[in-house]
Amino acid sequence: MAITTADLRIRRRPGRAARTPYLLIAPAVIAMLGFLVYPMASVLYYSLQHYNVTKPWDNGFAGLENFRTLLFEDPLFWQSLGFSVQWVGVEVSLQLVFGLALALIVNETFVGRGLARAMVFSPWAVSGVLTTGIWVLLYNPTTGVSRYLADLGLMQYGAAPLANPDTVFWAAVLAELWRGVPFFAILLLADLQSIPKELYEAASVDGATRRRRFIHITLPHLKDAIILSTLLRCVWEFNNVDLLYTLTGGGPAHATTTLPLYVAAKAAQSHDFGYGSALTTAAFLILTFFSIAYLRLSKFGANK
Amino acid sequence: MTLQTAERPRLAPPAQLPRTGRGEKGRVSRWQIWVPLALYLLFTLIPFYWMLVFAFRPRGSTSLLPWPITFENFETVWNDLSFALFFQNSLMVGIASLIMTTVIALAGGYALARYEFRGKRLFMIGMLCTQFIPGAMMLIPLFEIFRTIGLVNSLWSLVIAETVFQLPLSLILISGFIKNVPVELEQAAWVDGCSRLRGFFAVVLPLLRPALVAVGSFAFIHSWNNFLFALMFVSEQEKFTVPVGLAYTLGEFSVDFGALAAGGVVAAVPVVLVFAVIQRYLVQGLSAGAVKG
């Protein structure tokens, strides 16, 4: 790139050349300052305020009171945080395992591979709401899969996985898994393709079994991709509310309410923006802290 | 994404036997590929198939084949439930986000790839940090902003929010692709008397096609699928997008499953079409942008 810059300086009048890159990134910078950075800063500001649209007489500086309420007087904060951790942990680890297996399978050479890839990756493009729609069709007790299984005598009539507190978690996990596995499969497949074939050939010549080749060549090569994709996915699964919002609505009895879902409900229903902002700030801090700790502990990029 | 395509791989002739330098030892057998792949394909395709059956079979039917085929469910959602309107709104938001994201990311990506400038590092770090900002948590402040500038209940609020959230990844992806275009190609164009801008359009842009396809389709798919912003920023029914309309079909007390399935098909068709176009670019596109940075 040094050549480019030098070349540029020779060709162009100095003042103009210096301005060009700033003009080019200006739209992006302005958009992100206005609609990402400023809103983020205003969340921090509101989190220190009493700010409720429906109770304007109470508005004003609150100090850390919102955070005190959140930490000591709001069991739903802790409950939704706990559920978020459970949801993200189960979802991301299952998605990683199945996604890696799937990537290894569609990385092999076989006839019809292109078509097989397109089909197994396709749920990646499906929205959370549509996923809900599809799985409601599958789960509903009157015309869903359970009815046909009951017709065959394989189970009882009337099973409603989404209404039963014992099964709602796994029913939601399965639906999200359907749409989430392709993300890992796509990212890991890209990295699998970059492993030099010669490594495997050399290992085969030396008599390494397939399992040993997987452990000593494939996994180390994929390490950084796995770390980064799991981190991106954790953040995404933590933040995304579409599926749970529409599939379970956070219920039954708040059993499937994640922290962002709780925030969205607070903002939409009770109009308590001050407290909602405090919840947002807390979630952002937790997420940032987790991300830094994760990258440090996993020694991201250490062996390259 | 239909049943017929699901059956096709099984008719395929057996995979080739030894051809590469790999010996027989530790070689993956055909069964080790086909059995798990077939199981996973069932898991992936049955839900799609279930939706199609519910959408195309007559009301009250319990058949597991969409036969006799009927379009009454589509007539219901398209006309009675105003999906025609929602479809139009979603399409407008999707295309506007696609254009804005691509143009802004192209300009910024070129600057990042081809120039050294003060603040570049800070900008890159800032963009990575935005990946941790939760969309759901931006609802309150973004709503306030859109209310101030009078964009609540306007589809432009969705276009802006979508574009802003798509920008960081798109910028990184496009600048990565531009870096891979040898700068000598551009210099040759300059020597031939092209301006920097003309050189870019004549030489670089044609080579960026895969990147543009990837960025544009991601932007379209994301904005087509977005639910939460559309739910919160738009409350007039004639401005609903497809996911919001679909969510309302779900929310009815007695769900009309036929209509829900038909609405699902309406929501799925554009993304499936876009996906069919981009799936060959997907693996390189995503990795170049998201992982390799």
Image (cartoon, coloured by chain):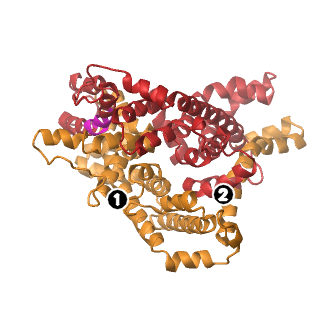
Residue B115 falls in image quadrant: top right
Callout 2 secondary element: helix
What amino acid is found at the position of numbered circle 2 in the picture? Pro
The range drawn in magenta is B41-48
Residue B191 falls in image quadrant: top right
Q: Which residue is mark 2?
A: B141
Q: Do circles 2 and 1 both sit on a common chain?
A: no
Callout 1 secondary element: helix
Q: Chain of mark 1?
A: A
B239 left or right of A103 in image: right
Give the foreground label among 2 and 1: 2
Q: Which residue is mark 1?
A: A90
Q: Chain of mark 2?
A: B
Spot the red chain and give its letter.
Answer: B
Spot the orange chain and give its letter.
Answer: A
Measured as percent of width and height from the top left, residue B104 is found at 70, 38
Task: Name the foreground residue: A177 vs A302.
Answer: A177
Measured as percent of width and height from the top left, residue B225 is found at 50, 39
Task: Name the foreground residue: A270 vs B278.
Answer: A270
Q: Residues within 10 Å of mark 1 (few under 14, many from 20)?
A: some
What amino acid is found at the position of numbered circle 1 in the picture? Val
